[in-house]
Image: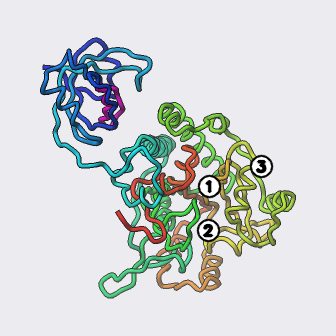
Amino acid sequence: MAEIVRLADIARYEGREVTVRGWLYNKTDKGRLQFLLVRDGTGLIQAVAFQREIKPEAFEAALRVTQESSIVVTGLVRRDARAPGGYELGLTDIQIVQLAEDYPITPKEHGIEFLMDRRHLWLRSTKEWATMRLRATVIRAIRDWLDSNGFLLVDTPILTPSSCEGTTTLFETEYFGEKAYLSQSGQLYNEATIMAFGRTYCFGPTFRAEKSKTRRHLIEFWMVEPEMAYADLDECMAVEEQLVSYIVGRALEERAEELKILERDTAPLERVQPPFPRLQYDDALALLAEKGEPLPWGEDFGAPHETIIGASHDRPVFVHRYPARCKAFYMEPDPQNPELSLSVDLIAPEGYGEIIGGGQRISDLALLERRLAEYNLPRQAFEWYLDLRRYGSVPHSGFGLGVERTVAWIAGLQHIRQAIPFPRTLGRLYP
């Protein structure tokens, strides 16, 4: 009986008869020769059914099998440089597990809404398959680097009693007679956990009720948020550039084939090495004015501004010390100029915009109390957060990295919605 194998391991079985369990990706009918492109979730292989070399019932199955039918094929593994992956199967048997109905996604051009309505099927296509495999590597690389550099994974709540970023982007729900909100960020909770463990991170879904239809926005997205005790803004930036460089390096090393499928030019990614350029906010404003996109002092950057800044550099670029009024209430002011905050964004090149936001957090109790009042935030909901400044407060910093924006940049995707298996965008909750 032939051994059941995965296509990812097919090179080890050259010259042997094997069985592959999968689905028909495509078929070419040449009469007495049937070329079946079979996928099993780990790869693709061309399986050749020659009428003279296969049982009649198996050849009949090859003739009638339809796209995306589930099949079990057995054959001899042989090298063929022209075939996907460099190998093909000379078939000796085919079994149809389920004969698929007419498959709605065909080689013809389909509109994006058509494909998104069928996202549960579109994920089987090669480019979507390659993107999800790249995403898995990005996530594993993030965790590997953090786990190896003194960070402890500490999970934070998805249901929270208060806002972290801004009250206008909250999803509100009822929690046994009280108001609760879907989490925008685990940062505030990890400011508590670092006082117990020094360096921590959380990793999970976050939710922003932003009515935005840009190619960079999702309603539900995944974010990793490291926090560090006794760390200032400079250390925060050093950790960010080390982490991002490691992620890109792992993607280039482990997902070269997937990046080829995505037709990604990897030359820009190969330049992603520390140190990253650093611009103060005022320097970034000067650059924008020089490029014909002036912005009044005190305003945060939008997509056009981030695109210009990113395009002016050959690797990710830090913009730091934004005006305090355009950043969150918890940002530490710059001791040299209290109108500025010790905040930082990391902007990816090639038009992908901000992939990380972070900075140094306020460590002084009195200042944080004033900020809560200035931002009109309910003090009662933040009493626990104020406790962190009452009992052993230290300078500390951290950041949040958006997984989908990072994947979109590394993959060279046109829209962030293809960087997550089932995107939630404005107006889309299906499937």
Q: Earlier in the sequence, mark 2 or mark 1?
A: 1
For label 3, count other residues whose C-alpha is less than 10 Å away and answer few (under 14), some (14-19) or many (20+): some
Q: Which mark is residue 420?
A: none
For mark 1, give the secondary structure. Answer: loop
Residue at 50% of width from left, 79% of height from top? 382
Residue type beneath disc 1: Ala
- Residue 347 in the image: state x and y as whole percent: 67, 53
* Residue bearing mark 3: 312
Residue type beneath disc 3: Ser
Q: Quadrant of residue 24?
A: top left
The answer to whether residue 162 of the structure is visible from this angle is yes
* Residue bearing mark 2: 363
Q: Which residues are magenta?
A: 34-47
Q: Quadrant of residue 361?
A: bottom right
Whether 186 is drawn above or below 105: the answer is below
- Asked whether 313 or 332 is in front, the reply is 313
For mark 3, give the secondary structure. Answer: loop
